[in-house]
Image: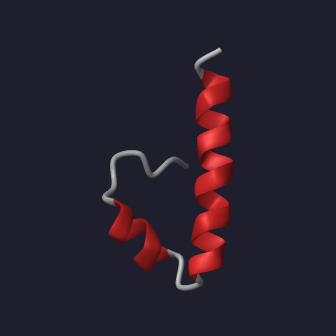
Amino acid sequence: MHFSALPLFHVLDYFKDEAQAIGHSREWARDWVDSRG
């Protein structure tokens, strides 16, 4: 599930732990770059 359509503050609110949110953002960014080829 990707959060690209959600504002960043919604992502941070979804992940109560900010560190977890940052970690998820890094994973999402890596997957997004990979998906672009």
Q: Is residue 32 above or below residue 14?
A: above
Name the residue located 63 percent from the left edge and 60 percent from the top edge: 24
The number of numbered badges drawn on the structure is 0
Query: Which residue reaches farthest top?
Result: 37
Name the residue located 68 percent from the left edge and 26 percent from the top edge: 34
- Horizontal placement of 1 versus 5: left or right? right
Quarter in which the C terminus is drawn: top right
- Can you tell which quarter of the image residue 10 is in? bottom left
Q: Is residue 17 above or below residue 34?
A: below
Q: Is residue 16 above or below residue 26?
A: below
Percent position of residue 6, x then y: 33, 55
- In front of the other: 2 or 28: 28
- Can you tell which quarter of the image residue 23 is in? bottom right
Name the residue located 68 percent from the left edge and 50 percent from the top edge: 27
Q: Is residue 18 above or below residue 36?
A: below
Percent position of residue 30, x then y: 67, 39
Percent position of residue 29, x then y: 59, 43
